[in-house]
Image (spheres, rainbow, N blue to C red):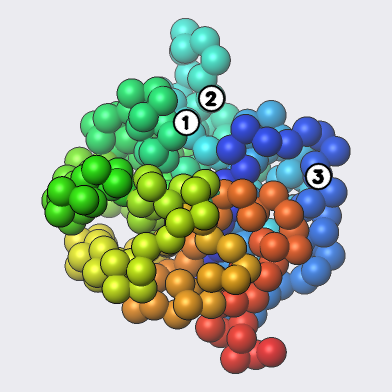
Amino acid sequence: MQLIAGNWKMHGRLASVAAIDALVAAGPVPGARLLVCPPATLVARFAEAARGSHVEIGGQDCHAEPEGAFTGDISAPMLADAGATHVILGHSERRAGHGETDAMVRAKAAAAHAAGLIPIICVGETLAERDAGATLEVVGRQLAGSLPAGGPLVVAYEPVWAIGTGRTPTPQQVAEVHAFLAARVPAGTPVLYGGSVKPDNAAWLLALPHVGGALVGGASLTPRDFLAIASAVPAARDAA
Ligand code: PEP
């Protein structure tokens, strides 16, 4: 099974539950697990719409503490209470825009585990870091600093320069980083690729060795595109 996870970022209103209804109505995709991570305001509503179906719902971030005086934050137990099964942590937009460090990501991942959530830990290099030949050093450092001790995990490799830009690395570049990460995560940990995954590039990305699925931003907002990406999982194509 590959995990096809949608990161809705700061998009969606209550009426957007129609997207979950569409994914549920379409039925399971062979070989693919579907996860949608909407803004916190929609987690409970989406989880209710997806209850009992093959579609799972996740959060996009959580605080390291279970509760307290942290205005504007959401805790891992709150996400679990709302019906989430996963939480994205350390996305580059939070690392860059909210000053999140590897140590903070690790603490949040431990909090996610304590609440019964599976953390999806994001790592990825900037274009300047890639051009400087530092990609493996950067993702290796982020991974080593962000992984919690024990517990189920998902890791996502998201080159910062490929997010929302329509640019993707070459197959060789993706394969190199995924082989590097696969050797450094606990056995059985899926390593997703993220960064401008679209219906027209999903097939080759998902067929690469050590790619265990995709973290999809923009294309996850449209059920047709999200399903087309899931249908590009090799097992889904074999079943078609
Ligand atoms: C993301 O932000 O996690 C992402 C992969 O975005 P996009 O697919 O839009 O590049």
Mark 1 CB lies closer than 8 A to ligand 1: no
Q: Camera-side residue: 160 or 235?
A: 160
Identify residue type, mark 2: Ile
Q: Camera-side residue: 158 or 235?
A: 158
**Which mark is drawn over residue 74?**
2
> Quick check: 238 above or below 214?
below
Q: Earlier in the sequence, mark 3 or mark 1?
A: 3
Q: Residues within 10 Å of mark 3 (few under 14, many from 20)?
A: some
Identify residue type, mark 3: Val
Mark 3 CB lies closer than 8 A to ligand 1: no
**Which mark is drawn over residue 31?**
none
Relative horizontal placement of residue 39, taking residue 197 as reference (left or right): right
Where residue 67 appears, as percent x and y from the top left, is 48, 19
Dot 2: element:
loop
Q: Are marks 2 and 1 in contact (CB under 8 Å)?
A: yes
Which quadrant of the view contains residue 80? Answer: top right
Dot in front, 3 or 2: 3
Q: Earlier in the sequence, mark 3 or mark 2?
A: 3
Relative horizontal placement of residue 114, taking residue 22 as reference (left or right): left
The residue at 52%/46% (across/down) is 164
> Quick check: 77 above or below 1?
above
Give the distance between the C-alpha atoms of the residues marked 2 and 1, in whole angstroms: 5 Å
Q: Which residue is mark 1?
A: 62
Identify residue type, mark 1: Cys
The residue at 43%/69% (across/down) is 212
Give the distance between the C-alpha atoms of the residues marked 3 and 1, in whole angstroms: 22 Å
Give the distance between the C-alpha atoms of the residues marked 3 and 2, in whole angstroms: 21 Å
Q: Which residue is mark 3?
A: 17
The quarter of the image holding the C terminus is bottom right
> Quick check: 16 above or below 198?
above
